[in-house]
Image: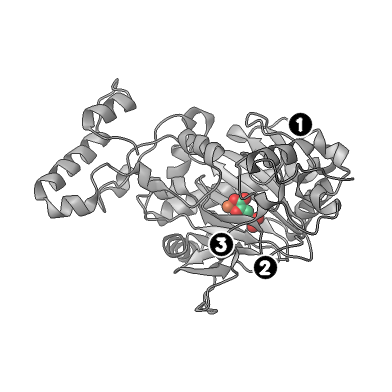
Amino acid sequence: MEVVIPNAANSIAEEVKAFDATKTGVKGLVESGVTKIPRFFVHPPEDVQKSSSETDTSLQVPIIDLEGFESSRRLEVVNEIRKASEEWGIFQIVNHGIPVTLLDEMLAGAKRFHEQPQEVKKELYTRDHKKQVKFYYGSAGLTIKPSYWKDSLAFNYPDGKLDPELIPEIIREEISEYFSYMKKIGKILSELLSEALGLRHDYFSSIECMESKVIVCNYYPPCPEPGLALGASNHTDQALLTILGQDNLGGLQVLHQNQWVDVNPIQGALTVNIGDFMQLITNDKFRSVQHRVLSVEVGTRISVTCFLYPSSAKISKPYGVIKELQPEKPPIYRETHFAELVEEFYALGPRPSNLSRFKFSLRSEESEENPFQFFVLNCRKRAFFTQKEGLSTSSFKLWAGLTPH
Ligand SMILES: O=C(O)CCC(=O)C(=O)O
Ligand SMILES: [Fe+2]
């Protein structure tokens, strides 16, 4: 089937909209036989470059064996998770309890969905954020350019709930089973991460910051001009935590010590990465990691991501730096709602973390030079976390002179 994209006389925005309206996704474009990719997929060459010349090939994303985490090896596992979350913001886990066969079936199910006839998939194609099940190309928000070279099928489970009837039959069993394992592994990770911060094991569950989940089945078709396109450009994830399963094609890379490092596929392993909101509430102790996906000329890559985000009751309530961590270091960030990050994601698309806009308005360089400002800054920070009940966040910000960036 031919995919018609308007000619170059139109603006890029119009081209993107017109392509989106075809509802055929990147896979449809490839099937139509394009040899040159539309210009809205073209990234600046420096963003697509495989690696810098000085890449240190000995760098490897930490691999953590969860064997014995409930008994003899708990402390060891917690320490490894702390180190990886502080230094890398990403790690792979093995022996996590999810059967390799289930992971393989999930990836095969995702492939099966995306390889159905266009007409069937079109019914689920949407940019409506409120839909719990959606199929789209690129990223979930229709950002103008450059687009991602991938198609996705996303399932939103606010508070862990999704009517199974909404899941396409071709993948229903796999998604339902995979989700129940994501719930289990999400709980295990929330406990291990709480302990890694020196908090009681149920800390994260008590603040309901990972009760909801989104599962996304990604399909990265081969790209006729892989040197120009990216499966995903450099970004950080916004949610608290991401759990990812990938097939053996590779292509996922993380930025570490200013170098792009491959996240090598390991059969049966899951990749876990820290997101922006986790970085904010942990006061930069755990860091969200910049990552991207390269595109390739031959082969189709499949991955399944699970993003963990706050419960419905908490999504529009402010979260700030965890109080128990403040004796270590005064809070860097003001309180914010996760919903604010999500709105921005839909408006601007995925990109590297810009948490600086949540920082307290006085910059530390200024305050260090000026002891009085430093004192005022700290009074404000303290006051922010002891604000009186009844004072709304926005009026409190005005009172405290904290202006959001
Ligand atoms: O497919 C992958 O390996 C990564 C996808 C990703 O980074 C994302 O969905 O946020
Ligand atoms: Fe990501």
Disc 3 designates what residue? 47
Q: Amino acid at mark 3?
A: Asp
Q: State which quarter of the image contains the N terminus.
A: top right
Report if the CB atoms under discs 1 and 3 are less than 8 Å apart: no
Disc 2 designates what residue? 266
Q: Earlier in the sequence, mark 1 or mark 3?
A: 3
Q: Residue 336: percent from the left, percent from the top?
A: 39, 36
Q: Indicate the secondary structure of the residue bearing disc 1.
A: helix
The image shows residue 165, relative to residue 255, as above or below, that is: above
Work out which residue is located at the far front of the displayed protein and give it: 9
Q: Indicate the secondary structure of the residue bearing disc 3.
A: helix
Q: Indicate the secondary structure of the residue bearing disc 2.
A: loop
Q: Residue 129: percent from the left, percent from the top?
A: 63, 32
Q: Amino acid at mark 2?
A: Ile
Q: CA distance from mark 2 to mark 3?
A: 26 Å
Mark 1 Cβ and ligand 1 under 8 Å apart: no
Q: Residue 41: percent from the left, percent from the top?
A: 67, 52
What's the coloring here? one colour
Q: Earlier in the sequence, mark 2 or mark 3?
A: 3
**Foreground: disc 1 or disc 3:** 3
Quarter where residue 196 is shown: bottom left
Task: Please name whichever residue, 386 or 334, is drawn nearer the observer in this view of the structure.
Answer: 334
Q: Residues within 10 Å of mark 2 (few under 14, many from 20)?
A: some
Left/right placement of residue 105 relative to residue 178 reads: right
Disc 1 designates what residue? 166
Q: CA distance from mark 2 to mark 1?
A: 32 Å
